Amino acid sequence: MSAADEVLGAARHLVQVFGRHDTAAYFDCFAPDATFIFYTSPARLASRDEYQRLWRRRQWEDQVDFSPA
């Protein structure tokens, strides 16, 4: 399998689990030390845990209508 195939497979999996609202599998797609930048957040998120905390507060799902459903 080529590197491109691996990346496309990982992206496909991420979109599928997001679409199912499987948050555990969604966050497992990211390394613990990944960083995130979103236009809805005023600061860079320094880890997967930081992103999960923001997600759990449901800021995006409720306030920005950022949900898979």
Image: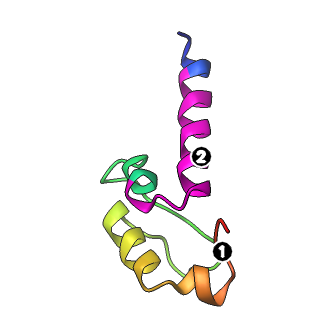
Residue that protrudes farthest toward the top in the picture: 1
Q: Position of residue 59 (x, y in %)?
A: 54, 86
Q: Position of residue 65 (x, y in %)?
A: 69, 81
Question: First in sequence: mark 1 or mark 2?
Answer: 2
Snapshot quadrant of residue 3: top right
Q: Which residue is mark 2?
A: 16
Dominant secondary-structure state across the stretch colored magenta: helix
The way the protein has been coloured in the rendering is: rainbow
SS at mark 2 in the image: helix
Please give the name of the residue rendered at 53% of the width and 62% of the height, measured from the top-left corner. 21
Report the amino acid beneath label 1.
Answer: Phe
Please give the name of the residue rendered at 60% of the width and 69% of the height, measured from the top-left corner. 38
SS at mark 1 in the image: loop
**Mark 1 surroundings: few (<14), some (14-19) or many (≥20) residues within 10 A:** few
Snapshot quadrant of residue 41: bottom right
Report the amino acid beneath label 2.
Answer: Gln
Disc marking residue 57: none
Q: Position of residue 34 (x, y in %)?
A: 39, 53
Q: Which residue is mark 1?
A: 66
Q: Please give the range of residues in magenta.
A: 6-24
Image check: 51 left or right of 61?
left
The answer to whether mark 1 and mark 2 are in CB contact below 8 A is no
Q: Position of residue 14 (x, y in %)?
A: 54, 46
11 within the magenta span: yes
Residue that protrudes farthest toward the bottom in the picture: 63
Please give the name of the residue rendered at 65% of the width and 65% of the height, measured from the top-left corner. 68
